[in-house]
Amino acid sequence: MAKLLVVDDEQGICNTMEAALTAAGHEVQVADSGEMALSLMRRLSPDILITDLRMDGMSGLDLLGKAREYFPGVTPVIMTAYGTIDTAISAMKGGAYDYLVKPFTPEQLEHLVERIEEFRKLRAENARLRDTVEVLSEPSTITTRNPRMQKVLDMARKVAATDSTILITGESGTGKTLLAKTTHDASQRAKGPFAVVNCATLSENLLESELFGHVRGSFTGAVKDKAGRLQLADTGTVFLDEIGEISPALQTKLLRFLQEREFERVGDTKTIRVDVRIIAATNKDLEREVQEGRFREDLYFRLNVIDLHMPSLRQRPEDIPALAEGLLQRAFAAANRPLRPLSAEAIRAINSYPWPGNIRELKNALERAAILCSTDQVTLDDLPDRIVEKTMDKAADRTNSGLSGATPLLSAAPLASVGGHADLSAAEVSLEELERRHIEGVLASSETLEEAASILGINLSTLWRKRRRYGLE
């Protein structure tokens, strides 16, 4: 069933079309002018707009132009009694999906609506594929044996059915993006786009343009009009990661959008209205940020309608086995190498390490291991030094206190193959080249060299030498 708005200044045509489309199971509203149509669209957010070309006051083409600017999610159709090539070209150039030549039959009208519904489904799927980045080395679903994490997932499933704004809190690397995507996939917006905006990686001006879009000439480098993520994600979800990093000016503009669901592009005065759900995330204490005057209190309360707090990896140790196994399999597959199991010593090290960088740090440690492993098992030599050193320190503490070693959480048995990854043969790529690629990837995703060195498990001077050796400076 589609939501349609029919616009014609001839009441008889409106009534006939309303009856035919309602009988076909659609939800229909009618308007007798372009001005009335725009007013209704703000309230109804129709899927399809069918408007007459020639009307008193605002013409169909003028209405089409305004609809495309203010309501980008609607699919427009022009009706005309003047079925000339010029009319068709004008309508299509104006952004119409198609045009109807009067008189037309109810069957022709319904056939057109069916084609539009199929078109909208394909467009939504394409947008979803375009905006959703599937990362090979990351899990695609959240599984847990931890009661705290299970409670978070249960809450996410409940709120997914609503349009409430969600704030996900927790340390960096705990999987906040994945939780946002999981919530989107469980919602009624699952067929719509899922757009991710990292608020910490862009300057204020670029972030404003990324969110709201801009018009040509609004700033240096704005050579053409650009739609923002909010507009492109119409009917879907926008995930604002690291929301605590946005400037006071952007906080004000975002607050207005959350209140009214409308905005203007940078350099433009025309208001655009979209239907998107906002999920935000932060690793900051926003209550403290509010108290210290760095974050607007009213914006905080607008964002924090539903609060989901992601526990750290050290708070869910029972999940480390499954996470490590899955990430290791993906790491070997990404390196195009045969799967190797963790040695007993490596298992103990992984289980006893506190993982301050959470799942992201675990993922990078196992990517490194998959690249460096040169035996039939992943050993301590393949893990970052900091993990091994921490394990040795804990072992020494247990010895000094007279405690026996803990039972490993991970089995030392070879890991099962997933998707045939274990059958992959090693490509003709040297370990040196694999290491270069790994370092290059970590550098690209790290904000500082210190962070990259920490993720790689090497000191800063070693990283400097390897950058120079591999030409990554």
Image (cartoon, grey):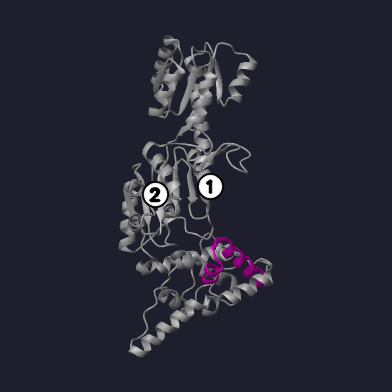
Most frequent secondary structure within the magenta stretch: helix
On the image, numbered disc 2 is attached to which residue?
A: 183
The location of residue 6, given as percent across then percent down, is 44, 19
Residue 408 locus on image (x, y percent) = 40, 77
Q: Quadrant of the N terminus?
A: top left
Disc 1 residue type (three-letter): Asn
- Residue 244 locus on image (x, y percent): 42, 54
Q: Which mark is residue 205?
A: 1
Q: How many marks?
A: 2
Would you say residue 451 sits in the magenta stretch? yes
Residue drawn at point x = 36 percent, y = 90 percent: 400
Q: Please say if the residues under marks 2 and 1 sit with CB atoms less than 8 Å apart.
A: no
Left or right: 157 with respect to 225? left
Q: Secondary structure at mark 2?
A: helix
71 over 239 or under it: above or below: above
Taking 322 as reference, is 137 left or right?
A: right
Secondary element under disc 1, as helix, strand or loop, is helix
Q: Is residue 296 above or below residue 118?
A: below
Q: Quadrant of residue 178?
A: bottom left
- Check residue 247 for magenta coloring: no
Q: CA distance from mark 2 to mark 1?
A: 29 Å
- Residue segment shown in magenta: 431-454
